[in-house]
Image (cartoon, rainbow, N blue to C red):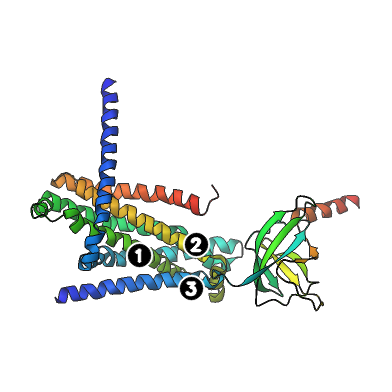
Amino acid sequence: MQHTRTQDTLVGLFVAAGIVALFFLSLQVSNIRSFMPADTYVITARFSNSGGLKVKSPVTVAGVRIGRVSNIYIDKETYESVVEMSIESKYDTLPEDTSATIYTAGLLGEQYINLDPGGSFDYLKNGGRIEITQSAIVLEEVIGRFLFQKAAE
Amino acid sequence: MLHFIQQLGSSTRTSFAKLGRATLFLGHTLTGAVDVAIKPRLLLNQLHSVGVLTFLIVTISGLFVGMVLGLQGYNILSDFGSEEALGIMVAASLVRELGPVVTALLFAGRAGSALTAEIGLMKATEQLSGMEMMAVDPVNRIISPRFFAGFLSMPLLAALFSMVGILGGHLVGVGLLGVDDGSYWSQMQANLDFYDDIVNGVIKSIVFGFVTTWIALFEGYDSAPTAEGVSRATTRTVVNSAFAILGLDFILTAMMFGDI
């Protein structure tokens, strides 16, 4: 009897340790909160070049992440890149004249969208569109322009 | 030449026959779920011998694998001046690949071989036929609890392996090499996705647990009832499990992470 008692305890401890490990992986290692589908609304922005922007790239205001890129597609008529962003509902006070810029985190890091709030008192709503945008800086283009300039001198 | 063709044919037939037996065996084992549900004590005993006794080798290996990843990763990353990415490197390689795969290989070596030897010996000493004589279904009574124990233990063991490994990487990276503690964790949290990385890793370990336990039990059940037969079956368990784990790992990785 004593034997099975210790066996029970050991099995219990084993299962508990396994579950703790699973919780550790979901909470400490991956950020489970970002998995929870928070309430969001969608706004779009058009860029002449969205560079290396990807679905799930962060959208920030003043360096704080307020949403993620949810979809990127090309407008068949204007050949512009249309970027849809899901913004968390608690950040619902983005002015209509907010501008969007694609930045790169570090020299070779991933690209993200930074929103620069304007001064309007009308706020962007679900389905709203950001008019003022600045495209991604493509490093090759910058280097190419620089070389041309040097050659011209 | 004719002899060679004959041999080819007969070995193909035997291997297909074996696959067929293995599939029927799996079906029979799964019907044993009822017996396990009625008598959870059977499962508990097997969870002890399959899970608890594998716990130690898995955690110690996990610790060392994590520590090695920390050291190697630091050496490579410091060349690029991005030591703070050590956390994501250690965690991603453990959670996605090394956790499930190395745990499954250890599991096949530690628990799988023991299962095969146990079942094979039971068969060689005619304990299984003895049970049949008493109208007790040996597959439901002996095999099923072992199968479900292995199936349940593997994800827990793999999660433990990954957790201990990440802590081992932290020990070496942050403790010895001076990577910043905050960036070790925050890089990890920012770049690992709960669904894409953690859940897929757990799915992998469930699949590996299923296949490894199945192979181990079937080889034992199908072994020749002699001392040599049992020893061969044990070898086959370890070899076939390793092949199955590594092959399936490629397929699963291609489905989950690669856009093939």
Res B157 label: 1
Q: Quick check: marks 2 and 3 in contact, CB under 8 Å?
A: no
What residue is shown with label 3?
Answer: A27
Dots 1, 3 in contact, CB < 8 A: no
Label 2: few (<14), some (14–19) or many (≥20) C-alpha neighbours in 10 Å: many
Helix, strand or loop under label 2: helix
Residue at the spot x=50%, y=73% of the render? B174
Q: Can residue B142 be seen in this view?
A: yes
Give residue A40's position: percent from left, percent from top.
63, 71
Residue in the image at 68% along x and 65% along y: A85
* Chain on which label 3 sits: A
| Number of callouts | 3
- The amino acid type found where label 3 is placed reads Leu
Secondary element at tag 3: helix
Residue positioned 27% across, 71% down in the render:
A11
> Could you tell which of marks 1 and 2 lies nearer the N-terminus?
1
Q: Can residue B71 be seen in this view?
A: no
Task: Tell me the distance, in whole angstroms, between the alpha carbons under discs 2 and 3.
Answer: 13 Å
Q: In which quarter of the image is residue B100?
A: bottom left
Disc 1 to disc 2, how far (Cα)?
Answer: 17 Å
Instruction: Quickly name the residue at label 2.
Output: B197
- Indicate the position of residue B68 as horizontal and vertical percent values: 44, 63
Residue type, numbered disc 1: Leu
Instruction: Find out whether the residues at labels 1 and 2 contact each other: C-beta distance under 8 Å.
Output: no
